[in-house]
């Protein structure tokens, strides 16, 4: 009978059919909080409007933030708040739309940040290791750049009169941020001292120089264009902007000679000369003093190399802002433009925590990244701002074994119904989190900088963890295959979206679609 009613219902309007199944479900089922939460979510989906045009777009990139990183970070965030953890969501995991993203580069099954971010910013996939150029490039060959440059969403936003901003906790010349503004045959050409002589003689310029000269380069590229340049750039990487001369060291310097540039140029001084109404800042005090309502533009270089891991930020020499602080301040500056803005925010060091084999640093940086997304949600209007949150690629990071609900995510596996760590076939306990490859086990206690592992000998394979507290910040997970650095992984990553045009983020998509979502929302390319 029930089957017949269902068939009939498909021919009739829904209202006439509700009686066929009304009251079928037991109350114990429909009063379950799981059931009711799901009903609430479906009702919200049905009530959703689908506008497509945005005033502002913010693209968040968690570098190396694969699906297992999201799951483990949400559990850790919940457990740090005194909950079991599995039931929670990172801020952007509550966004209404999501997609799976295929990350491969044109020439690589498992990609890198340069090829992936170029795809997201330029709308076409390209080769591994290159910035802002198409697949016809030969990596490292300056002579192949001309004619193969692509135009990015950030550049199109500038041409359209929007304000633009870039933020990264990595060096601002590193692959992900560089792919928003630079064209380079090699991601490693961060300053002139990193370039082969043939590239310098061939007329290629370094990535830091391209950032500081962005406005001029745009106006050379587009005859008759009058753009006003990038309004906000926050990140690390000061060494690529300063001459290799101790006289240029800043108060935040760690190395005896902070600058790397061998051409004598001080790009921070060049930037200030070009923008006398701009503010150049390099520490927390300078950051806190930014007058967001009146400043014309701001360049913040908070570390000579990458900025600190969030867990290690208190150890910075002159102090530096968090990713969420940088995001909120950037929006306060960018939203002074009534035409709208495009902002890219990268958490660059989730990737570095994983490369060093430290789940603790990767996950605590992911939690700060989620806070930065929430800061953007709080500072903007969902009616006019498209927020996209994605990664560039994954890592070989796994959540394994059969730990019971609420088991500490950084801990050893304790099974359902047990209070003691489960034993592997070798008689030793094992952790839930692990890496397929990399440098392997470390017990560094309360160390908060994952990079402390570099310089030590690899310690791969099984270790006796019986007397090791694996939940400390300095613990590094076991890794099977010995490598100098843990690697990226090739499986799909996620894209989460809210705001106008967010509903177009659906299904399993190629990574270069991200550009087209931005372009569509802002109408960046005239038909
Ligand atoms: Zn990486």
Image (cartoon, rainbow, N blue to C red):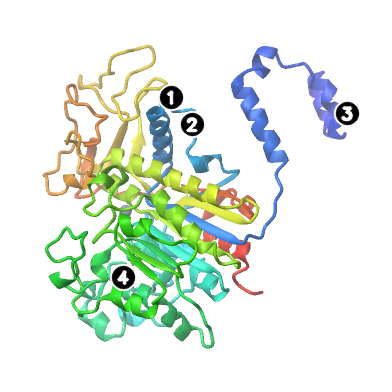
**3D distance between C-alphas at marks 2 and 3:** 38 Å
Name the residue carrying label 2. Answer: 88
Question: Mark 1, residues whose alpha carbon is within 10 Å: few (<14), some, or many (≥20)?
Answer: some
**3D distance between C-alphas at marks 4 and 1:** 45 Å
Percent coordinates x, y for residue 53 in the rendering: 66, 60
**3D distance between C-alphas at marks 1 and 3:** 44 Å
Residue 214 badge: none
Q: Secondary structure at mark 4?
A: loop
In the rendered view, does 428 fall on the left or right side of 289? left
Q: Secondary structure at mark 1?
A: loop
**3D distance between C-alphas at marks 2 and 4:** 40 Å
Question: Mark 4, residues whose alpha carbon is within 10 Å: few (<14), some, or many (≥20)?
Answer: many
Q: Residue at x 54, y 76 (%)?
A: 159
Q: Residue at x 51, y 78 (%)?
A: 227
Q: Secondary structure at mark 2?
A: loop
Q: Does residue 459 show up?
A: yes
Q: Secondary structure at mark 3?
A: helix
**Quick check: 403 above or below 418?**
below
Name the residue carrying label 3. Answer: 16
Return the disc, 1 or 3, that comes first in the chain's sequence. 3
The C terminus is located in which quarter? Answer: bottom right
Q: Residue at x 83, y 21 (%)?
A: 20
Dot 2 and dot 4 residues touching (CB under 8 Å): no
Name the residue carrying label 4. Answer: 186
Eye-nearest disc, 2 or 3:
2
Q: Quadrant of residue 401?
A: top left
**Quick check: 5 above or below 94?**
above
Name the residue carrying label 1. Answer: 83
**Quick check: 164 above or below 91?**
below
Percent coordinates x, y for residue 14 in the rendering: 83, 32
Question: Mark 2, residues whose alpha carbon is within 10 Å: few (<14), some, or many (≥20)?
Answer: some
């Amino acid at each position: 009978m029930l089957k017949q009613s269902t068939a009939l219902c498909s021919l009739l309007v829904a209202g006439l059919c509700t009686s066929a199944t009304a009251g079928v479900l037991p109350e114990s089922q429909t009063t379950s909080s799981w059931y009711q939460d799901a009903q609430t979510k479906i009702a919200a989906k049905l009530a959703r409007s689908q506008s497509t045009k945005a005033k502002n777009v913010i693209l968040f990139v968690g570098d190396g933030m694969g699906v297992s990183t999201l799951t483990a970070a949400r559990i850790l965030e919940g457990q740090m708040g005194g909950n079991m953890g599995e039931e929670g969501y990172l801020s952007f995991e509550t966004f209404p739309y999501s997609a799976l993203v295929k990350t491969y580069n044109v020439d690589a099954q498992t990609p890198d940040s340069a090829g992936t971010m170029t795809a997201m910013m330029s709308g076409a996939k390209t080769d591994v290791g290159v910035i802002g150029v198409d697949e016809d490039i030969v990596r490292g060959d300056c002579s192949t750049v001309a004619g193969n440059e692509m135009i990015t969403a950030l550049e199109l936003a500038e041409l359209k009169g929007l304000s633009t901003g870039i933020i990264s906790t990595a060096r601002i010349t590193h692959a992900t941020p560089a792919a928003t503004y630079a064209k380079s045959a090699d991601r490693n050409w961060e300053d002139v001292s990193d370039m082969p002589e043939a590239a310098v003689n061939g007329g290629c310029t370094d990535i830091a120089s391209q950032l500081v000269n962005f406005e001029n380069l745009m106006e050379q590229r587009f005859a008759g264009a009058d753009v006003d340049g990038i309004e906000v750039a926050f990140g690390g990487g000061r060494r690529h902007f300063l001459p290799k001369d101790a006289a240029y060291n800043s108060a935040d310097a760690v190395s005896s000679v902070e600058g790397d540039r061998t051409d004598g140029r001080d790009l921070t001084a060049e930037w200030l000369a070009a923008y006398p109404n701009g503010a150049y800042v390099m520490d927390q005090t300078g950051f806190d003093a930014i007058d967001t309502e009146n400043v014309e533009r701001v360049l913040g270089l908070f570390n000579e190399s990458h900025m600190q891991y969030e867990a290690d930020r208190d150890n910075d020499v002159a102090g530096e802002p968090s990713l969420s602080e940088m995001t909120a301040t950037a929006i306060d500056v960018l939203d002074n433009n009534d035409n709208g803005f495009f902002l890219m925010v990268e958490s660059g060091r989730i990737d570095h925590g994983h490369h060093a084999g430290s789940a603790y640093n990767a996950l605590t940086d992911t939690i700060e990244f989620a806070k930065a997304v929430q800061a953007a949600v709080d500072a903007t209007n969902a009616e006019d701002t498209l927020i996209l949150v994605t990664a560039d690629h994954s890592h070989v990071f796994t959540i394994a074994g059969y730990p019971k609900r609420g088991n500490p995510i950084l801990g050893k596996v304790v099974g359902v119904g047990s209070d003691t760590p489960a034993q592997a076939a070798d008689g030793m306990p094992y952790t839930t989190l692990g890496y397929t490859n990399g440098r392997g086990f470390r017990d560094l206690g309360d160390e908060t900088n994952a990079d402390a592992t570099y310089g030590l000998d690899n310690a791969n394979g099984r270790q006796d963890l019986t007397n090791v507290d694996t939940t400390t910040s300095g613990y590094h997970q076991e890794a099977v295959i010995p490598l100098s650095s843990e690697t990226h992984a090739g499986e799909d990553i996620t894209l989460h979206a809210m705001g106008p045009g967010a509903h177009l983020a659906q299904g399993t998509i190629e990574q270069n679609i991200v550009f087209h979502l931005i372009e569509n929302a802002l109408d960046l390319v005239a038909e």
